[in-house]
Amino acid sequence: YAKAQASTGGVAGNFDYFVTGSAQTFDGYREHSAGHQIRLNSNVGYQFSPMLETRFYLNATKTKQEIPGEVSKAQALDSPESANPGWVAQDQQRNVDSIRIANKTTARVGETTVDFGVFYNNRHVKHPIFQWLDYTVDDYGGFVRAVDERQLGGMRNRLIVGGNIHNGELDTEQFVNVGGQKGALASSYVDTSENVSLYAENSLYIQPNVALIAGVQYLYATRERQDRFLSNGDQSGSSDFDLWSPKIGVLWEINPDWQVFGNVSRSAEVPSYDTNNFAAASTSTLKAQTATTYEIGTRGQIANIRWDVSAYRADIEDELQCLTTGPFSACSPINADNTVHQGIEAGIDAAIGQSFFADGDSLNLTAAYTLNDFFFDGDALYGDNELPGVPKHYLRTELIYKHPQGFYAGPNVEWSPESYYADNANSLTVDSFTLLNFRIGYDAGSGWSAYLEGRNLSDEHYISTVAIAGTASPTSEIFNSGTGRSVNAGVRLRW
């Protein structure tokens, strides 16, 4: 693995700019997982006055990536570096050339701030997988967002209103994959999508430190396919969605550094515009996923301790799932029956000690924990089974020593303490794992910095991701092994 990156920026009068470019290449931990990437990110801004400024963005990326493919659980754990032979025989890859241009302008008028902008994104994807996919994506759109803060009836009020347009076209040709080369044409179609959303949210402070919050979002979306390859039937079709998502909540600012909040909100997610297959009733009738979410939480800082903790429950209808049905096919999108996502998201950052060896040094603890209690709720096929693909508990924590002259060192741990399921039928599990990592470095804030990091130092064999299935068996090829022991180092120069 090797990566090089260079950045530069500057200010000239009312102009400013920043440009960063990077190139990386890697052999990959698994067989047939090598790749390389070149990336450019840049922006230039101009301030007309303290009340008006604009910024233009240009981002470009070229990626070439081999795909090792999912394997059986036994192969993933016993031979984690190996690839799926079928994927290697088809030379499966994902190669993407993309460019994105955008503008954002900010205007301030009295007590109101307005942001608005436009964007265009083009991606050309050459993707030999179960078939040889060659497609171009053109996305374009714009947004406007206004924030108004003023007194209403002697009470502080904050109103946010806005809208987004995000439209796109996906022009696809699929060919038979013959050893990684294009064979006969298998399908050809154009998918188009339109997404228009409008939203408003108002926070009224009925007390100096207590706000009542109410909001609503409206989404109109269309999905359309025009089939150009008719020898296997006409798979053209269209669908549209009208969705409202209201929200109410309360915010209590106990002090300037400590907040407590609670809210109830509706949300909606429409199928992505490449998932509809209008020749099959199971997918041509895909519904939007909707949910009602209840959330309470707190965030803040006291002395050297910062935290962000929330608990939530989402009652979901028609959850969108994409289920693996075979090793040489795309996953099949479905709507599940009622499901529940509930859990806890907690993060903490604390300086637990200072001045151990020198004035100004510190020992810092950071931790992020998630509880993911996801399950079907009386599903006709799966009953109250757990939803697959996500560990129920996950903890990442780091204890690091920092010296005032720039030296730092410490271990971190990633821990998934319980097995979780790989399929809706709850017939096959993903094992628990613990990863021990360590990093050491020097960064005095100017001039140069360097680091050395070791990951998975115990070289544990584990499964990093799973392609979920309806019902899996021990031979199901749905698992991706995690990376074994690795060491990387880097140096950064600044001037």
Image: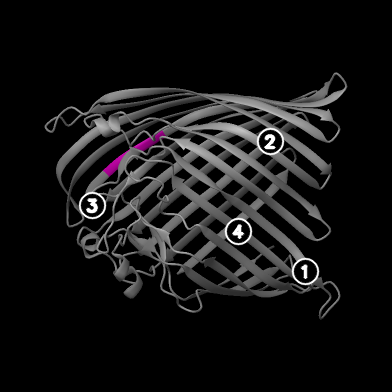
What is the three-letter code of the residue carrying label 3? Gly
Residue 46 disc label: 2
Q: CA distance from mark 2 to mark 4?
A: 41 Å
Quarter-of-image position of residue 273: top left
Q: CA distance from mark 3 to mark 4?
A: 34 Å
Work out whether residue 49 can be spotted: no
Q: Earlier in the sequence, mark 2 or mark 1?
A: 2
- Around disc 2, counting alpha carbons within 10 Å, would you say few (fewer than 14), some (14 to 19), or many (20 or more)? some
Q: Which residue is mark 3?
A: 326
Q: CA distance from mark 4 to mark 1?
A: 18 Å
Q: Assess whether mark 1 and mark 4 are in contact (beta carbons under 8 angstroms).
A: no
- Around disc 1, counting alpha carbons within 10 Å, would you say few (fewer than 14), some (14 to 19), or many (20 or more)? few
Query: Is residue 216 shown above or below 5?
Result: above
Q: Is residue 447 left or right of residue 420?
A: right
Q: Which residue is mark 4?
A: 369
Q: CA distance from mark 2 to mark 1?
A: 43 Å
Q: Quadrant of the N terminus?
A: bottom left
Mark nearest the camera among 2 and 1 is 1
Q: Position of residue 428 (x, y in %)?
A: 33, 60
Furthest residue in direction bottom, as rendered: 357
Q: Earlier in the sequence, mark 1 or mark 3?
A: 3
